[in-house]
Image (spheres, grey):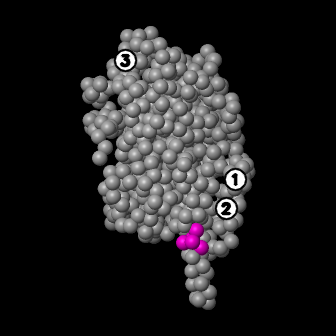
Amino acid sequence: MNDIQFVARFAALGKPLDIDAFALSSGFSGLRKALAMAPAEVVAEVKRSGLRGRGGAGFPTGLKWESIVGGDERYLVCNADEGEPGTFKDRFVLEHAPFLVLEGMAIAAYAIGARTGYIYVRGEYPQIVASLSSAIASAVKAGYLGEHILGSDFAFGVEVRKGGGSYVVGDETALLNSLMGNRGYPFLKPPFPTEKGLWGKPTIVNNVETLAYVPYIFAHGADAFASIGSPDSPGLKLFSVSGHVAHPGVYEFPMGSTVRDLEAAAGGAMGNLKAVQIGGTAGPVFDAAALDYSLDFASMRKAGGALGSGALVFMNTTVNMAQVLDVTMRFFAEESCGQCFPCRYGTRQLAFMANKIASGQGKVEYLDLMRDTARVMVGSSLCPFGQSIALPLESLLNGFGDEVVSFVKQQEFLKEAAV
Amino acid sequence: MAINGRVSAGGADTVDDAGGVGKKRSTRRDTLLSALHEVQNHSPGKTWITNGELAGIAQDYGIPLAELDGIVSFYTMFSRERRGRHVIRLCDSLSCRICGSLDIYQHIRKKLGISRGMTTGDGAFSLEIVNCLGACGTSPNMMIDDHLISGLSAAEIDTMLDSLARGEA
């Protein structure tokens, strides 16, 4: 079992909005240590820790902070627009350990020279919008946010903003557009937000979980952080485990733990394990051989997938893969922002064919048509959303294509027999 | 607002009358979505944005009405059409689907006599399907207005919907 924990340890205090309980458990000790260093040293320490972004892309956090350039004003944005299906770890952090995120934001803001931070919370988490505002007020009152933080010259304020319901806004460029009161369209990089972000000013966008692990690096040291997990992906990770397991939930494990470790932590699969989708809806659906995969960025890439948000959806043998195909393609069609044609039209075609298949009106040739459509989308979509549909689609058709084909044929036969 | 009232973001930091809501609010663009939520849900049972409210916000923020309409239509949580007093958002992510979301959908559909995207004749409920509520540890899930609802039996769902329809809870 797993005995190294950080976020889960704070969550276990059971008093998420009690700032004294948080401080008594050595909360804010990382901020205190960071403020004793020069901002450039703080960035260097995060680089040394090897922390990688936990929103899905895994970009090295220290490198991102280091790359912020120019600007008379800079911003820090916490991305709490968690929308990846199967993912609920940011909700967990914000509900159970909100002060860790605020502490991480204060350290990040000090490092990059930001005076204002925003937390963009998805609209579907209204209670979190309210509880965060109360947590921020407590932190200001106790001197961890606001003017002269912990008696220093450093000033930093945090504001909460509520989203309106959109998956694509989870992308950092789309999020910035939404934060500025626009349609949540992603924009092409470069220029990167670190150069031109919010209101055209240099901006760092970090995921909730990424920011929650920043205090660890200063409370326990970059070496301690780097000693956990794998060399490629150091530290701990929050995994969202759902589907056919005895105890679905958020589990904190070192990076590089196996799928089997997480399955065991969640009380084991219910029934016979058939498949597991890893990394979210944009991740591949693997068969049960995935139990031996290591959950870190490099290992998952080698396995033909991606760690993504660290979501694991376990499926037992009662699940019809035509349904999985249908749910997945419909998701893409409904959440495509519609800005570029290949994605807007391609996702609709794919959803149409997948829905025909799942509802017993499919044709065998749809499978090849779907592959072709996805391939075009990979090469021509504007943002990673449209490019990523090939991963779940091809994994379903390659790993479970026989099942889908026989389902299509069986439905065809039943229809003919009924005439 | 920024700390100590200092303005930290771009755009005018004027405070205007909110036209129709009767409340002062900031008109910095980063507050636009919050303002839309506010007018949409300014009183219990009101769940959509009226033409007058949209025009009020367009004026306050200095955004052309057509552009604002385009912004509103991008986001799934806003509605420009009249919705029921209670909005049911049923999650049909993969996690919820394999844990029985379709059974719940069929149950609610039969009980209320409406399908996805429809509103009941008495104006009590609108039924929507969403792609993930971020609560997959308790699948299958739904939200009714601001509340996350998980793990209810068919009978419990009936009781809850009945009491909401009667204007309780």
Residue A49 is inside the magenta segment: no
Badge 2: residue crowd in 10 Å (few <14, some 14–19, many ≥20) = some
By secondary structure, the bulk of the magenta-drawn segment is best described as: helix
Q: Please report the residue visible at 71 percent of the width from the left and 61 percent of the height from the top.
A: A372
- The mark closer to the camera, 1 or 2, is 2
Q: Please report the residue visible at 49 percent of the width from the left and 56 percent of the height from the top.
A: A277
Tell me residue A36's x, y (percent). 40, 13
Q: Which residue is mark 3?
A: A32
User: What span is colored magenta in the figure?
Assistant: A401-405
Tell me residue A212's x, y (percent). 41, 32
Badge 1: residue crowd in 10 Å (few <14, some 14–19, many ≥20) = many
Task: Tell me the amino acid under the disc marked 2.
Answer: Arg
On the same chain, marks 3 and 1? The answer is yes
Q: Chain of mark 2?
A: A
- The mark closer to the camera, 2 or 3, is 2
Q: Is residue A59 visible?
A: yes
Residue A403 is inside the magenta segment: yes
Q: Quadrant of the C terminus of chain A?
A: bottom right
Q: Which residue is mark 1?
A: A377
Tell me residue B161's x, y (percent). 38, 60
Q: Chain of mark 1?
A: A
Alpha carbon separation for disc pair 3 and 1: 48 Å
The residue lying toward the viewer, choosing from A9 and B165, is A9
Label 1's element?
A: helix
Q: Please report the residue visible at 36 percent of the width from the left and 60 percent of the height from the top.
A: A269
B74 with respect to A147 (left or right): right
Badge 3: residue crowd in 10 Å (few <14, some 14–19, many ≥20) = some
Residue A371 badge: 2
The residue lying toward the viewer, choosing from B49 and A376, is A376
- Tell me which corner region of the image, top left, top right, bottom left or bottom right, holds residue A37: top left
On the same chain, marks 2 and 3? The answer is yes
- Tell me which corner region of the image, top left, top right, bottom left or bottom right, holds residue B64: top right
